[in-house]
Amino acid sequence: MWLVIALPLLGSALLLVGGRRTDSFGPLLATVLSWSAFVVAALTLVAMLGMDAADRSRHVSLWSWIATGTFNLEAGLLVDPLSLTFVLLVTFVGSLIHVYSLGYMAHDPDKRRFFAYLNLFVAAMLTLVLADSYLLLYLGWEGVGLASYLLIGFWNWNPPYASAANKAFIMNRIGDFGLGLAIMLMFATFGTVTFAGVAQAAGDAGTTTMTIMGLLLLLAACGKSAQFPLQAWLGDAMAGPTPVSALIHAATMVTAGVYLVVRSAPIYNLTPDAQLVVAIVGAITLTFGAIVGCAKDDLKKALAASTMSQIGYMMLAAGLGPIGYAVAIFHLVTHGFFKAGMFLGAGSVMHGMNNRVDMRTFGGLSAKMKTTWITFGLGWLAIIGFPFLSGFWSKDAIIEAAWVGEGWRPWVFGGITTLVAGLTAFYMSRLFFMTFHGKARWLEHDHPHESPATMTIPMVILAVGSVGLGAFLKFVGFSDWLAPVTGHAHHHEPVLPPLVITALVLTLMVIGVALAWVRYAKEDVPVVAPEGSLLTRAARHDLFQDMVNDDVFVNPTMSLARGVSNDRGVDNGLMGIGAGVAGLSGALRHIQNGLVRSYAMTMLMGIVAMFLFVWMVQR
């Protein structure tokens, strides 16, 4: 199984060390090595399916990593249904994105470096999900952060793109700080940081300790998965090449937080308070992302808002405990296919529209880009929960789980997930109709055309997954497959009958699609966006999240930095210390005058002072 990580890591190393000498074959080599990792993962799946459920968790020891005193930590891999699910998703979708990139980046002079970073991204994510300890997971966690920084800022000659990479990197460091503290707390409490060791000892720790640990892990998850309040970086991350956006949003980075929470189930099962906070954060984020998505005119940023909202669904499900762990991963897998397909579709639209992303200058593209229109359309139907497509099975499972419980929780969480399902149908239909339907609003120099086969074939494969993957996983028993890791969730009836919940969701979906059709397909869409209401303006500016961050964190920090860097701050203080030492030296140097009788008098005064001190102490 170590080959799954080693193959893409080898590709990254060869392309970076080989330099320009690998330009001619480097991108193809990186793609082949990524597919090779998928083949290894698929063969592992076949082997695991032949085992009993109780035997489907294997520890693969690699080498002794940290050995000091009585503490010994091996670098090892944990191969079980949860980690293998992520490995298959990352390698398959990631490899399709590699193939797509062969066409998308064909004319970029630095494409060899781009593919090296893609391989590094895949290898880091695979390290993260295969690690058998929180410390090795942290290594992959930071590798994902590094790779995302390199890819988001790939065209760093453009200052806004470089700034977007910095923003993503810095905001993720806040979450990473939480993960680092959580690992330190585990070591101090349990004396181990392995998943097995923590799970075994968790029951002996105090509730307060476990709650703090769970909240620190949630802080880490909020950074990587762009959850409230660390979500501001996600929209700006669209600065990178579109294949990067697909990789970040579908198969790698933003799914890492959900994986961390589900993998840490033994901790969250012992701390209901931290578990509740996970669900609340998910509820806030899925609503936040949906509102923002309703007003974005940038195609990729609208999809980014959608990702934020859908990951919020998964996080909320993970916060529901054993009834939600499996459905969170179920939606994560199906979302990986239809969101990757739509991001690659967005790249295809940009390819045919002079690299523009403003949907107000699109419209009518269904006649010119039929493959892109059909594949994107299937992803759109999947994400809005159209009956019997992938999203219908996975997202509705989360909504039904949210309606389970006692007291206020099912009414709040169930109500939010149901209402946002209707909002999802509206903003995703708005995106689809503005891009492919209605009156053509192209600019004079536009000549929309379909993308080459290297780009459309991955889109077709992902569209097939958007249609049938959900039903396939549902009927082969995906929840039972994950049960050895997530536990068997006992059946609980929601407070509303399941048929009523489904009817509500479908009704809201139809209303959302109809409103979007009337407003953005049937009626003319102005090329220049109207000013709109206060809520519309707020949504266009991400509900003013950057302004809040600037006023609360950035500006005070910059003021402090400026204050301590001028003459009244650190410089003045250090100069004062230096001047004081120089003055004292100038006074003391007069004592060293070279006269013996002066030294004798000084010694006599010292002796008298010592006798006086002893006499006073004895009294």
Image (cartoon, rainbow, N blue to C red):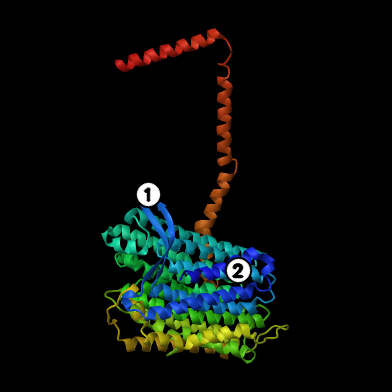
Element type at marker 2? helix
Q: CA distance from mark 1 to mark 2?
A: 39 Å
Q: Quarter-wise, where is residue 399 in the image?
A: bottom left
Q: Quarter-wise, where is residue 491 in the image?
A: bottom left
In front of the other: label 1 or label 2? 1
Q: How many marks?
A: 2
Relative image position of residue 30 (x, y in whole percent):
59, 73
What is the three-letter code of the residue carrying label 2? Ala
Element type at marker 1? loop
Relative image position of residue 140 (x, y in whole percent):
48, 64
Q: Tell me the number on the disc at residue 116.
A: 2
Query: Dot 1 surroundings within 10 Å: few (below 14), some, or many (20 or more)?
Result: few
Res. 298 in view: no
Q: Which residue is mark 1?
A: 69
Q: Is 536 on the left or on the right of 160, as rendered?
A: left
- Please report the residue visible at 49 percent of the width from the left and 71 percent of the height from the top: 4
Q: Is 118 on the left or on the right of 217, as rendered?
A: right
- Please report the residue visible at 46 percent of the width from the left and 76 percent of the height from the top: 41
Query: Is residue 616 or residue 19 the one in the foreground?
Result: 19
What is the three-letter code of the residue carrying label 1? Gly
Quadrant containing the C terminus in the rendered view: top left
Relative image position of residue 283 (x, y in whole percent):
40, 73
Query: Is residue 581 or residue 362 the one in the foreground?
Result: 581
Q: Quarter-wise, where is residue 572 in the image?
A: top right
Query: Dot 2 surroundings within 10 Å: few (below 14), some, or many (20 or more)?
Result: many
Res. 546 in view: yes
Quadrant containing the N terminus in the rendered view: bottom left
Relative image position of residue 251 (x, y in whole percent):
50, 75
